Amino acid sequence: MYYLIVRNLGAPRCIDRNQKDVYEDEMSFDCTPHLECDPKEFVKEVEIICTEHPEDPFVAMVFRD
Amino acid sequence: MRKYYLLLTGALLVLLSSGCTSVKRFKSAKYQGTDHTLVDVELFSSGLTGSEADLPDKHLWNLSASAQTRLIQALDERYPDNEQFMDALGKAYLVNEDAPVVDLTRKDLRMVFAISKERDYARLNDATGRFSPADRIEYLEISLEIPDQHHLKFTEWNRYVTEYGEIEIADVSFSRSVNLDAGGNLGESDLGGKFSLNRDEKQMVSERYLKLNGRISDHRVVIEEEGTREIDLTGNVTAEVSMKFGGFPEIVVIPLFSDAGDRGGPAELTALKLVDVLVPAMENAPDTLFALLTMDYIYRHVQSGWLTYAEWDDQVEYYRGSVQKKVSLFLGQDYLPPFYCIGSDQEGKEALKYRKNPQREYLLQFRDYRDASRFLEWLQNPLREQNKPVFIGSNELLYRGDPITPDRVLGDQLKVMPVY
């Protein structure tokens, strides 16, 4: 399982999870959920867009279990 | 006759001396080079305002005067009992579900700069000394630069205050002068745009105390000050600017309780309202945000002629200097949203969440301590079935991925904690 994790104001949160690594730069996500995730291995960094506030792109990290 | 000549000569001397003061700037002037030790600047105080989470709800105290009167009359009729009436006064009545996003990314920054001169009285009559009681800072440029890694930028000027006057700005740049009007009151005039002098304006410029310029860019704010005759720029300068962080979306919950009815019984949660909030976007939250403060100045040293208050007989030496230092601009508590959650930090920080559906779980974060505390009290209600998972409508409450029960709330010693 792959997890998309953002870190804002020092607090990390998992906003999406997927069986495959579908995460690419400039993809849009709902950034408000706090999902249960089990991140173990860092995969990559991607720059995503939060659908609620598309003005400021945000750097997110992809992990896998 | 001789008396008249003496009087006439005296009058001419007085006229001549007053004429000199209004025409001559100094007796002589020369540029002596750089000296970075003559003037210093400190960011004496700074702070952010506008950080409260002013979420959209309505209660008696934020209604208009006429609405307050009507509501008090209605509550008085409905609740004759004094305790019930008092309880009803403090209740939130309307929470707007379609409220616009609450923006916590815009802040006002107030800075007080203290500008001081080196006063070396020990070398007052020393020919190589660089201090006299008539010395003054004639020109200064203060610049404050914030690093761009914080996604924080200046947006506009609000106010600028010196000991000679105060001006409201509300723009990205300004050019003003502070002067005395005919009545001796302090005033200001805008020097922006086209500027040609007529006779009246020339007079006004001659009375001017200070010339002020300010400009602002995303990461830098610059203040330029020039004192006119006998005006020393030593002292405090206050500047107020608006700033904006990058935005990151959050959802805050407002619990609504129906506790105005049965006093003494447990408060019943009627709804959990969700409010969209925009908080500062910053990967890490530094305890202190630093900026680079730079001040360039021109120092007017009076080498001789400082025995008189008038400046026209001064032999002036000019020095250029520069001061640069890293200053603490504001603290984390000034910009971190004051949100609270319910959880524990015993085995890593973990907080309650609510599940709308398997793909949508949200942190249960409250706008203030009071809301979170009241919700925890409701959760720990002893009349509730202690081993039954808690639901709010169809939404399940989760803790560490599992449904939460009142038993576990007590067993795991859940408490109200700040989110950030």
Image: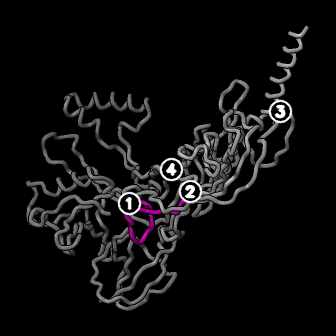
Q: Is residue B394 left or right of residue B237?
A: left
How far, Cα to Cα, is label 1 from label 2?
33 Å
The amino acid on which the numbered mark 3 sits, given as a three-letter code, is: Asp
Q: Is residue B301 left or right of residue B26?
A: left
How far, Cα to Cα, is label 3 from label 4?
35 Å
Return the residue at label 1: B332
- The reply to the same-chain question for discs 3 and 4 is yes
Specify few, some or many for label 4: CA neighbours under 10 Å numbering under 14, 14-19, or 20 or more: many
Residue span colored magenta: B277-294
How far, Cα to Cα, is label 4 from label 2?
23 Å
Residue extending farthest to the right is B1
The chain under label 1 reads B
- The reply to the same-chain question for discs 3 and 2 is yes
Q: Quadrant of residue B87?
A: top left
Tag in front: 1 or 3: 3
Return the residue at label 4: B111
Query: Disc 1 on helix, strand or loop?
Result: helix
| Mark 4 or 2, nearer chain start | 2
Specify few, some or many for label 3: CA neighbours under 10 Å numbering under 14, 14-19, or 20 or more: few
Return the residue at label 3: B200
Say if B354 sits above or below A2 in the image: above
For the N terminus of chain B, the quadrant is top right
| Mark 1 or 3, nearer chain start | 3
The amino acid on which the numbered mark 1 sits, given as a three-letter code, is: Gly
Tag in front: 3 or 2: 2
Q: Is residue B59 magenta?
A: no
Return the residue at label 2: B37
Say if B12 sits above or below B290 in the image: above
Query: Disc 4 on helix, strand or loop?
Result: strand
